[in-house]
């Protein structure tokens, strides 16, 4: 099961003998959002701009809350906040507890 590590909204789980903060929605979850079935394909890292040597560069850090999702009806991809996915009805998940 592929998980989102160090997200803003998390629960704890033991993975590889260590307690880790993991996201509440695993990759591969199929959920109904606004009447459409979507599948979570990836979690995008958080990005911010920082000045380095007089130039602005983009820095990435773990734990973003934006998911890349695929609309299963149209096969188009888009971005969606985890708040929508947490509140959505879960159709299918890889989580053995059957929760998103």
Image (cartoon, rainbow, N blue to C red):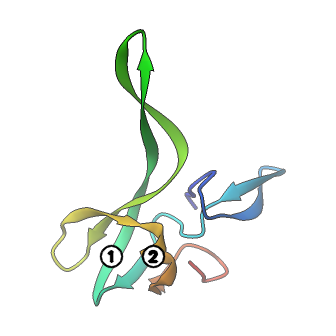
Apparent side of residue 12 relative to residue 33 in the rendered image (left or right): right
Apparent side of residue 73 relative to residue 35 in the rendered image (left or right): left
The image quadrant that residue 50 belongs to is: top left
Q: Nearer the viewer, residue 89 or 83?
A: 83
- Quadrant the N terminus occupies: bottom right
User: Decide: marks 1, 2 in contact (CB < 8 A)?
Assistant: no
Q: Residue at x 36, y 85 (%)?
A: 32
> To which residue does mark 2 refer?
85
Alpha carbon distance from label 1 to label 2: 9 Å
Q: Residue at x 53, y 39 (%)?
A: 61
The image quadrant that residue 2 belongs to is: bottom right
- Quadrant the C terminus occupies: bottom right
Residue 38 marker: 1
| Secondary structure type for disc 2 | helix
The crowd level at tag 2 (other Cα within 10 Å; few <14, some 14-19, many 20+) is many
| Secondary structure type for disc 1 | strand
Q: Number of numbered discs present?
A: 2
The crowd level at tag 1 (other Cα within 10 Å; few <14, some 14-19, many 20+) is many
Q: Nearer the viewer, residue 25 or 55?
A: 55
Q: Earlier in the sequence, mark 1 or mark 2?
A: 1
Q: Residue furthest right?
A: 17
Residue 54, horizontal then vertical, whole percent: 37, 11
Please determine whether, in this image, residue 91 is positioned above or below residue 8. Answer: below
Please determine whether, in this image, residue 73 is positioned above or below residue 27. Answer: below
Q: Residue at x 47, y 68 (%)?
A: 82
Residue 34, horizontal then vertical, whole percent: 30, 86
Please determine whether, in this image, residue 34 is positioned above or below residue 7. Answer: below
Residue 25 marker: none
Apparent side of residue 35 relative to residue 22 in the rendered image (left or right): left
């Amino acid at each position: 099961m592929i998980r989102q590590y160090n997200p803003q909204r998390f629960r704890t789980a033991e993975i590889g003998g260590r307690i880790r903060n993991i996201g509440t929605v695993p990759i591969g979850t199929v959920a109904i959002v606004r009447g459409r079935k979507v599948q979570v394909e990836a979690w995008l890292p958080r990005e911010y701009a920082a000045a380095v040597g007089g130039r602005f560069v983009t820095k990435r850090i773990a734990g973003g809350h934006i998911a890349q999702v695929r609309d299963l009806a149209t096969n188009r991809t888009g971005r969606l906040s985890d708040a929508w996915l947490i509140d959505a009805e879960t159709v299918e998940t890889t989580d053995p507890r059957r929760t998103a």
